[in-house]
Image (cartoon, rainbow, N blue to C red):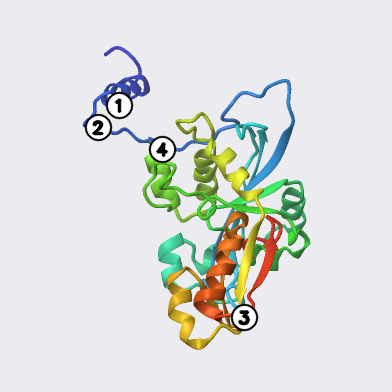
Amino acid sequence: MNGAPDDRHAQAARLLGTHPDYRVQRRLTPVTHFHAASPEGSTRIGVAIDVETTGLDRETDRIIELAIQRFRFDERGRIIQVGMPRVWREDPGMPIDPKITSLTGLTDADVAEQQIDESVAVDILSSADIIVAHNAAFDRPFVDRRLPAIAGKPWACSMAELDWFELGFEGRALAHLVSQCGWFYEGHRAENDILALLYLLSHGLPDGETILAKMIACSEQQTYRVNAIEAPFDAKDRLKSRGYRWDATMRFWWRSISEQDRDAERAWLQSDVYGGYGEPAFLPITACERHR
């Protein structure tokens, strides 16, 4: 071959990619857009977000790295503009557990005397029509507590709000999903994770829609949080097997359901849990309240 090394590698990758016994993966690289903008139609703003923290406890642990990246998408869920990533480290005021350092690569020295630029972070997040995280139930409580000015913004979760198996994927971990799309990256650093998230959201599916379009459709649907208040103690195994989780603070079982499942869930609770001697609470949830 007479081409440059990059050309040779690209040709080799294309050749391997046509063979059924090989799969070719490409490293994620920064982009300015995934689709060309259309002169017609409206657009919206999204912000991809990821945090690294000192641990899993939303009450006592702290953010040590925050990454956000703004993007613009059209009515078809195509990402037509990608902004520059903004990444901040923050001193948590406590030693970083060696396990967290092993996972993220961040040490006490890396975050010493560092601080999130709150005004810039709030300005970017406030501009969003939707904030997207891959595991928003983890990220949102930390962000809402650290940046309370944006606590009422709508969030979407690319991990939990989509039926990945139905979409033709196996598993739902970000790195694994991106791998199935033909890409790879070094994970567990916030900046790399938001780039991977943008690639995943832009991925086109066989029906012509993007992952982002599917996720936005799910996010805009109203769901319900079902609180099985004062459910009999002997119903705990039935509730758990149906997907209910125990709220240790409020001391009742709860789960999230879609609007179309509300009547069926009420009927099941009355027949299999309460036996006609109690009433669950159904609380409507939108993207503004979800994942808190």
Q: Position of residue 154 (x, y in %)?
A: 70, 54
In terms of sequence position, does the residue under pointer 2 or pointer 1 come before the other?
1
Distance from Cα at disc 4 to Cα at disc 1: 13 Å
Residue under label 4: 181
Q: Is residue 272 left or right of residue 81?
A: left
In terms of sequence position, does the residue under pointer 4 or pointer 3 come before the other?
4
Residue 281 visible (yes or no): yes
| Residues under numbered marks 3 and 1 in contact, where contact means CB atoms less than 8 Å apart | no
Given residues 195 and 144, the one toward you in this image is: 144
Distance from Cα at disc 3 to Cα at disc 1: 55 Å
Instruction: State the residue at coordinates (35%, 23%).
Output: 10
Residue under label 3: 229
Q: Is residue 154 above or below residue 92?
A: above
User: Label 3 sits on what residue type?
Assistant: Ile
Q: Is residue 186 above or below residue 114?
A: above
User: Label 1 sits on what residue type?
Assistant: Gly
In terms of sequence position, does the residue under pointer 3 or pointer 2 come before the other?
2
**SS under mark 3:** loop
Q: Position of residue 286 (x, y in %)?
A: 69, 57
Distance from Cα at disc 2 to Cα at disc 1: 6 Å
Q: Residue furthest top?
A: 2
